[in-house]
Each structure stands twice: as C-alpha cells, then as structure tokens.
Image (cartoon, rainbow, N blue to C red):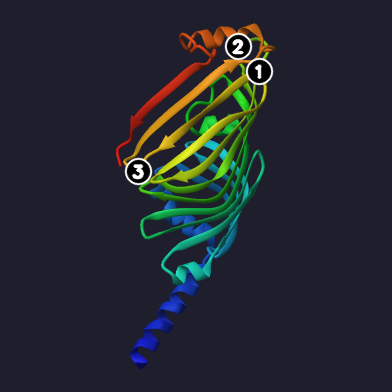
Amino acid sequence: MRKYYLIAAALTFVAGLILLAPAATLYGWIAPRLGGQVALAGVTGTVHEGDAAAVMVGGSPLLQDLHWHLSIGELLLGRLGVDLDSRGAVTLSGHVSRGFGALRASNLLVSSGLKPLLAVAGQAYAPIDGQASLDLKHLKLLGNWPSDADGTLRVQNLAWTLARDPLVLGDYQADIQRDGNDIVALVHTLGGPLDVNGDARAKSDHSYELHLQLRAKPDAPPLIVNLLHSLGQPDPQGYYHLRQQGKLQP
C-alpha cells in the first residue's frame, strides 16, 4: 500500500510542477507543433492560470486579452478543462473541456463582428458585414462533429457591402437544439426587409442539409427583390427556396 501512496505523491508533485510552470515556457515548446495555425502573443502567468495579449488563427487576429483558468477537478477525472474569458473585437467567455475523444463547451458566450470571423475563415474580402452573437448552454463534439447542442445564434445588422451604400438585410436568429440523433438550427427573421425561415441540420453520419425560404417584405428595396430573382422561381406563396446538402469525411 505504501508503494501506491508514493506513486500518488510523485504524480501529484509532477502535476504541481506542470501547473505552476510558466505558460510562456510551455507555449514556446508546443508552438512549433501547432503548424502556425494558432499563435499566441504576450503570454504571461502559469499553466494553471494565465493570460495572452492576443490569439491569432490562420495569421488573422481573433482574440485579445485572453484569460484562462485550468480546472484541477477535471484533471482528476481525466479531462482537460479550462474557463476562458477574452475582451476586444471578439468577446468570449465560458468553459471548454477535452477528454475521452469529446470536446465539450458549456455556458459559452461569443460576440463578434462578422469581419473578424470571415478573416479567420479565409474570406476576409467577402462583401458581408454585421454582428454575430452565440449563446450555447452546452455543446458536445465527437470527431469535430456536433453530437449534442443547445443554444442560440443571432446575426444582427446583416449587410451586403458590395453596393456603393451597404444594403441592410436585417436581423436573424437560429435556435440550436438536438432532434433525435441530429442537431438542428431553426432559422427565423427578427427584423428587416426579408422574411426568412427554415432549418439547417447536422446528421450523425456527418451529412448536413440546409433549407431556407426567403421572401421580400412589401417595403424591401428593389435591389433585394432583384437579388432574390437570382435564386430562381418563387413558389405560389412568393418564397424563394435555398437548398444545400453534403457530407463531410469523419
């Protein structure tokens, strides 16, 4: 029995050394293994609790003034869990954990302009602007694919910026929830010149489906009406249908 106590004490000592190690030192060791996709600047504090002045993704700035706090309790359960908080153009707060092949998030709040998100996605020059906010009570990813989710995504002041004057498209909301083995986002209009509703569905076999129906409101600008014409012919109720489906490799 004494042998096991000694092993436990040794493991606790090693874990303590790691948790109290300077975060900048550990980041300097793992940074080359990230392939340049994620980069931190101004790293201070310890592995247990620290800060980064900036987070870059794909060479584009995403987060500023990021603070983290590692959960000791989850380490004892074999999971790596951390509370996150950031300020700046993109704000983020919530809890994220990784373990047993799953990535989990809870009480996750994200708010950002669309431009920084598009830049990270490699679409910095897309003629779209607006403000996005995500409120997730919980999210579970298996193999980088959602298996459970409950939350809300809002896009406000959505605008098409290719015209000389930005064309305001309105405000929209997607209610995200589990539907059997699928994750579905129910989309509807909060306000603006377009009447939009429909759903996006992520299935357990890594396939997805999107179906939106769009109709210009009576006071919609003529340019919006012309844009809808590019989607084809409307149905008898005047809705234009946008459909897309596909499957991603696990």
Q: Nearer the viewer, residue 21 or 116?
A: 116
Residue 193 in the image: state x and y as whole percent. 66, 18
Going by the numbered disc 3, the residue's amino acid type is Ser
In terms of sequence position, does the residue under pointer 1 or pointer 2 come before the other?
A: 1
In which quadrant of the rendered view does residue 182 lie?
top left
Q: Which mark is residue 204?
A: 3
Look at the numbered discs 2 and 3 and tell me whether their residues touch, using CB distance below 8 Å: no
Going by the numbered disc 2, the residue's amino acid type is Ile
Which element type, helix, strand or loop, lies under badge 2?
helix
In this picture, is 125 found above or below 134? above
Q: Residue visible at 63% across and 49% down?
A: 86
Q: Nearer the viewer, residue 185 or 235?
A: 235
Q: Residue visible at 59% across and 13% down?
A: 162
Residue 178 in the image: state x and y as whole percent. 46, 46
Tell me if I can see residue 19 in this picture: yes
**Mark 3 vs mark 1, CA separation in Å:** 35 Å
Q: Which residue is mark 2?
A: 224
**Mark 1 vs mark 2, CA separation in Å:** 8 Å
Q: Would you say 9 lies left or right of 174 here?
A: left
Q: Residues within 10 Å of mark 1 (few under 14, many from 20)?
A: some
